[in-house]
Image: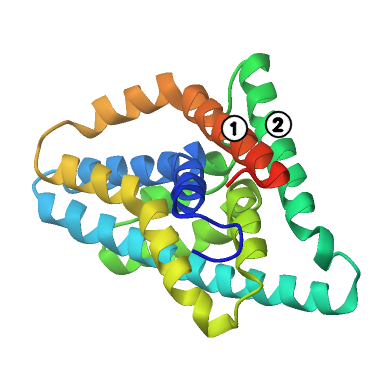
Amino acid sequence: MIGSLTLKELISLGIADSVNPCTLGVMTVMLIAILTYNPEKRKRVLSSGMAFTGSVYFMYLFYGLAAVKFWQVIKVFTIISPYLYKILGISAIILGAKDIYEFIKGGASCSVIPLINNQLQKIASPGGAAVLGALVSVFLLPCTIGPYVILTGMLSILQLINTLPYLLFYNVIFVLPMVMITLIVYLGLSTIDDISLWQAKNMKYLNLTAGVIMAILGVIIFMGLL
């Protein structure tokens, strides 16, 4: 890997990002809407779910490249470069502590779903799902960007084009739960209602998991243990 970024850290950051309850919640509601209005068209679940996932994937890839460039500009015009990993480590600890605190307070909720609920109910095609994926990527960025900020800061020592393999791999991890949900529903291994119920019960634990991973990674990055 590069600098102090290891494969374990890259995968851990991707996992912390992938269990974000908001993104998974939006996708679940979208699939519910598709099955409600098109119960006989199960293939539409597959095509729409993959279109949604692909749209999110490429939007986040763009965000990643933009974030790397931002860090590179910041490092040129400021004196933070020698302290970058310390700053990233502290940031990760703070972000992780925030998620853990939210769990202690009573769990996490996603305020974005009610805002786009009307749009979710209108999804009837892969094209609409792709548009929704792009829209969701914009609205959810503030609550999913934390691990990505840490990763892109660590990648900023590379030329922009050389960060692509890392960002491509990271985003595969990020969207993997979306692919799994889509395939589980399409193959009939579980109903969307069961998935929705499980998610509602476990959303706060997903947030806690992300928080613990971020906090541990923050300590590792700050201390330079890997």
Q: Position of residue 81 (x, y in %)?
A: 81, 67
For the residue pair 214 and 60, the one nearer the viewer reads as 214
Q: Looking at the picture, does residue 196 appear above or below residue 166?
A: above
What is the quadrant of residue 219 in the picture? top right
**Res 216 seen here:** yes
Task: Identify the residue at horizontal 57%, vertical 74% (top origin).
Answer: 65
Local secondary structure at mark 2: helix
What is the quadrant of residue 50 in the picture? bottom left
101 sits to left or right of 9 = right
Q: Which amino acid does the dot numbered 1 rest on?
A: Gly
Is there CB contact under 8 Å for labels 2 and 1? yes
Q: Residues within 10 Å of mark 1 (few under 14, many from 20)?
A: many
For the residue pair 154 and 113, the one nearer the viewer reads as 154
Q: Which amino acid does the dot numbered 2 rest on?
A: Lys
Task: Identify the residue at horizontal 90%, vertical 72% (top origin).
Answer: 78
- Residue under numbered circle 2: 98
The colour scheme of the drawn protein is rainbow
Numbered badge on residue 211 = 1
Local secondary structure at mark 1: helix
Task: Identify the residue at horizontal 78%, vertical 50% (top origin).
Answer: 86
For the residue pair 128 and 103, the one nearer the viewer reads as 103
Label total for image? 2
For the residue pair 164 and 203, the one nearer the viewer reads as 164
Which label's residue is closer to the chain start, 2 or 1? 2
